[in-house]
Image (spheres, rainbow, N blue to C red):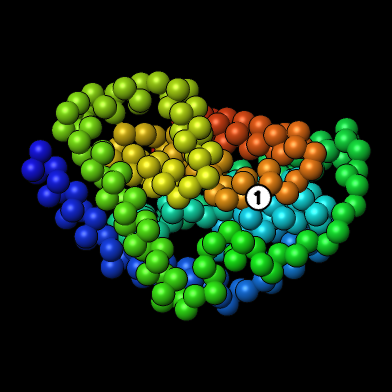
């Protein structure tokens, strides 16, 4: 057990400088973009899902929350919102970069799923649904402050805060994984999930719904440890919209509309990940 603790501390310590550099780059991109993405998205019209997917891939502080505000204020469509949710960047990106991996295939897969699902949802809504009533213009300027993501900090300080927060989760998750592997054996642990692709994708999607960075940390570490498949990883990451879902349920009315968005998000993430695992796409994305 001493080896488990030492390995956990060493593995986490080795990642810290790379995590900080990754977050520093993400903060720089975010501050350069400012609120331009939100303004562009409100004017996107029929191409909202495409722009939402593209903007979602770019690291943005609280962007899923901003998209939720825009949707609640009837400024973007459900398809644009879902495209943001499905493609939005999360802790997978800096963690993989810190391991020397740039997951461009995973990012492209999330983008493709988000854009296609977004256009499909908007098409179906246009054919079968009534137009949502207008509402007041969204005030997205204070989203970061309200969601406590500290966008106003200096980029180095903000990057350091993100690094330390994720390092804590990494330390905890790595310890739990190493302990599980030590007690159960890596082959047995991988077989328990790997031999049940449907169950693995379903559980990953459930974990991904947790509105906390710990969920994407867990999924990424499980994937890097070879315990879950690339399809299961994507099932979890596709539905992982962060605080966006919390903002949606708090501000969007009627509540049943928010549940509808949640159901579509979960179904798309689960089915897309399962489809990847059951086709040659799994080998292409791995």
At 65% across and 36% down in the image, what residue appears? 262
In the image, what residue occupies the spot 31% across and 65% down?
A: 18
Q: Residues within 10 Å of mark 1 (few under 14, many from 20)?
A: many
**Spot occupied by residue 75 in the image (x, y as percentages of width and height):** 81, 56
Q: Can residue 59 be seen at all in this image of the molecule? A: no
What residue lies at 26% left-to-right and 38% top-to-bottom? 177
Residue 272 x/y as whole percent: 56, 34
Which quadrant of the figure contains the N terminus? Answer: top left
Q: Is residue 24 left or right of residue 14?
A: right
- In percent of width and height, residue 13 lies at 21, 60
Residue 74 shown left or right of residue 262 in the figure: right
Along the viewing direction, whichever of 253 and 55 lies nearer the viewer: 253
Decide if residue 136 is on the left or right side of residue 50: right
Q: Position of residue 199 (x, y in %)?
A: 45, 22
Q: Between 105 and 161, which is closer to the camera in this rendering?
A: 161
Mark 1 element type = helix
Of 256 and 64, the residue lying toward us: 256
Residue at numbered disc 1: 247
Residue 199 visible within the image: yes
Q: Which quadrant is home to the C terminus?
A: top left
Residue at 76 percent of width and 51 percent of height:
71
Image quarter of residue 183: top left
The vertical placement of 100 against 237, above or below, is below
């Amino acid at each position: 057990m001493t080896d488990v603790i030492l390995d956990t501390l060493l593995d986490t310590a080795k990642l810290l400088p790379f995590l900080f550099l990754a977050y520093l780059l993400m903060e720089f991109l975010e501050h350069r973009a400012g609120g331009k993405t939100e303004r562009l998205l409100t004017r996107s019209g029929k191409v909202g899902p495409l722009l939402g997917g593209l903007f979602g891939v770019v690291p943005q502080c609280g962007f899923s929350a901003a998209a939720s505000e825009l949707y609640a204020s009837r400024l973007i469509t459900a398809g644009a919102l879902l495209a943001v949710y499905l493609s939005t960047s999360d802790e997978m990106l800096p963690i993989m970069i810190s391991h020397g991996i740039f997951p461009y295939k995973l990012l492209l897969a999330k983008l493709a799923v988000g854009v296609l699902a977004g256009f499909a949802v908007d098409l179906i809504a246009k054919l079968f649904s009534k137009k949502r009533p207008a509402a007041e213009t969204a005030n997205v300027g204070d989203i970061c402050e309200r969601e406590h993501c500290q966008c106003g900090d200096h980029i180095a300080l903000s990057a350091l805060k993100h690094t330390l927060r994720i390092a804590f989760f990494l330390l905890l998750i790595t310890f739990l994984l190493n302990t599980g592997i030590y007690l159960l054996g890596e082959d047995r642990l991988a077989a328990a999930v790997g031999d049940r692709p449907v169950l693995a994708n379903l559980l990953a999607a459930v974990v991904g719904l947790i509105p906390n960075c710990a969920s994407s940390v867990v999924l990424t570490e499980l994937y890097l440890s070879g315990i879950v498949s690339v399809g299961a990883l994507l099932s979890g990451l596709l539905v992982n919209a962060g605080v966006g879902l919390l903002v949606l349920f708090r501000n969007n009315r009627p509540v049943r509309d928010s549940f509808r968005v949640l159901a579509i998000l979960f179904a798309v993430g689960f089915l897309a990940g399962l489809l990847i695992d059951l086709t040659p796409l799994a080998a292409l994305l791995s």
